[in-house]
Image (cartoon, rainbow, N blue to C red):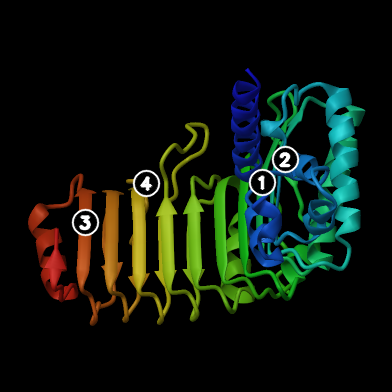
């Protein structure tokens, strides 16, 4: 009997040893830069929770390179007192980061209704943008929905956002909110700009052409209101227009003009130009263009300079009244392609 107890005790001790070995905290053994990289993939709420795991996490969570403020991931995010509590936590997180560099900052926020609480939220979100600029943010992603009882609302970003010397990439997804154009005198170091589901005027494209001297990538996804779009940029290398899902209450554009000596790639999806346009609807000047993708309806005509360095083109057009042979003649004259679909 005594021997049996000894065997059981030995087995029990071995089991405890195996269990303790399997519970080794390998996360604490990782280098700080690796831990910060892992923590940067968490949204702000999970990041705050992780800060309570250990003293080390509490020290590192204020220095992660990326922050993600997403109200959509918060359970009960429409409850005003939970949102207020959340705002306080996020405010403290940013205050603790004062002076620490932020590489990537993403805000995904939905403002519901017209209340004093929403006005406070709006002010605090704008304050977060100010703080990110002070922390030399490089990539700023704003996904904001100003849903004020179905009314069209406007948003004016702080001028310091565009003046920020460290900012290289800006993404604006505003759920068809009116975006006010910055002053044409405000220059920016932006290299990448993405506008999605926004309402803008033609002067915004004038600002891009005149003040974005370093821009290389431009993406326009379902932008409403402008009757004509004109982009002229010597630094632009890639441009992507997507006209899918345009609202019926807004008329389609009657002219699209793209000009850039360094443009290598042009991608235009589902363009629908007005049949009433009296001038050339699509005008492209890109002598160094390599890749062209064009789909949609061009009602009256195309006007392009010869693409000397073209390598690949995918063109799917509904010519309307234009004769197919006219398209073929245009392709033969202007597109010296290595590959054509």
Quick one: SS at disc 4? loop
Q: Nearer the viewer, mark 3 or mark 4?
A: 3
Sequence-first tag of 2 and 3: 2
Say which residue appears at 74% left-offset and 72% top-offset: 186
Q: Indicate left or right for 58 with 8 as reference.
A: right
Q: Which residue is mark 2?
A: 46
Say which residue appears at 41% left-offset and 80% top-offset: 262
Q: CB under 8 Å between callouts 4 and 1?
A: no
- Residue 297, relative to residue 6: is it above or below? below
Q: Which residue is mark 1?
A: 42
Q: Indicate left or right for 45 with 278 as reference.
A: right
- Residue 31, relative to residue 264: is it above or below? above
Measure the alpha-carbon separation of dots 4 and 2. 49 Å
Q: Residues within 10 Å of mark 1 (few under 14, many from 20)?
A: some
Q: Residues within 10 Å of mark 3 (few under 14, many from 20)?
A: some
Q: Indicate left or right for 89 with 234 as reference.
A: right
Screen quadrant of the N terminus? top right
Measure the alpha-carbon separation of dots 4 and 1. 46 Å
Measure the alpha-carbon separation of dots 2 and 3. 46 Å
- Residue 135: x %, y % from top left: 81, 66
Q: Nearer the viewer, mark 1 or mark 3?
A: 1
Q: Which residue is mark 4?
A: 274
Residue ranking furthest to the left: 325
């Amino acid at each position: 009997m005594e021997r049996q107890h000894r065997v059981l005790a030995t087995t029990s001790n071995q089991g405890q040893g195996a269990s303790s070995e399997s519970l080794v905290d390998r996360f604490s053994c990782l280098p700080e830069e690796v831990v910060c990289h892992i923590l940067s993939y968490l949204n702000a709420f999970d990041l705050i929770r992780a800060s309570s795991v250990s003293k080390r996490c509490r020290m590192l969570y204020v220095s992660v390179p990326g922050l993600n403020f997403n109200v959509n991931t918060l359970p009960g995010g429409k409850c005003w007192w939970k949102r207020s509590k959340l705002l306080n936590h996020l405010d403290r997180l940013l205050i603790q980061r004062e002076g620490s560099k932020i590489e990537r900052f993403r805000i995904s926020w939905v403002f519901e209704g017209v209340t004093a609480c929403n006005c406070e939220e709006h002010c605090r979100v704008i304050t977060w943008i100010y703080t990110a600029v002070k922390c030399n943010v490089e990539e700023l992603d704003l996904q904001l929905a100003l849903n004020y009882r179905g009314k069209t609302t406007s948003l004016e970003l702080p001028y310091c956002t565009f003046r920020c010397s460290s900012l290289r990439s800006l993404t604006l997804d505003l759920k068809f909110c009116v975006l006010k154009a910055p002053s044409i005198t405000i220059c920016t170091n932006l290299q990448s700009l993405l506008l999605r589901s926004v309402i803008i005027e033609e002067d915004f494209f004038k600002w891009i052409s005149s003040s974005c001297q370093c821009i290389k990538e431009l993406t326009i996804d379902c932008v409403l209101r402008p009757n004509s779009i004109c982009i002229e940029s010597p630094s632009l290398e890639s441009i992507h227009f997507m006209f899918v899902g345009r609202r019926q209450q807004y008329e389609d554009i009657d002219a699209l003009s793209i000009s850039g000596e360094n443009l290598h790639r042009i991608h235009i999806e589902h363009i629908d130009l007005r049949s009433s346009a009296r001038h050339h609807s699509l005008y492209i000047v890109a002598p160094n263009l390599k890749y062209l993708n064009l789909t949609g309806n061009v009602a009256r005509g195309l006007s392009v300079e010869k693409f000397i360095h073209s390598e690949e083109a995918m063109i799917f057009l509904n010519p309307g009244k234009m004769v197919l042979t006219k398209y073929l003649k245009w392709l033969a004259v202007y597109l010296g392609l290595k590959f054509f679909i």
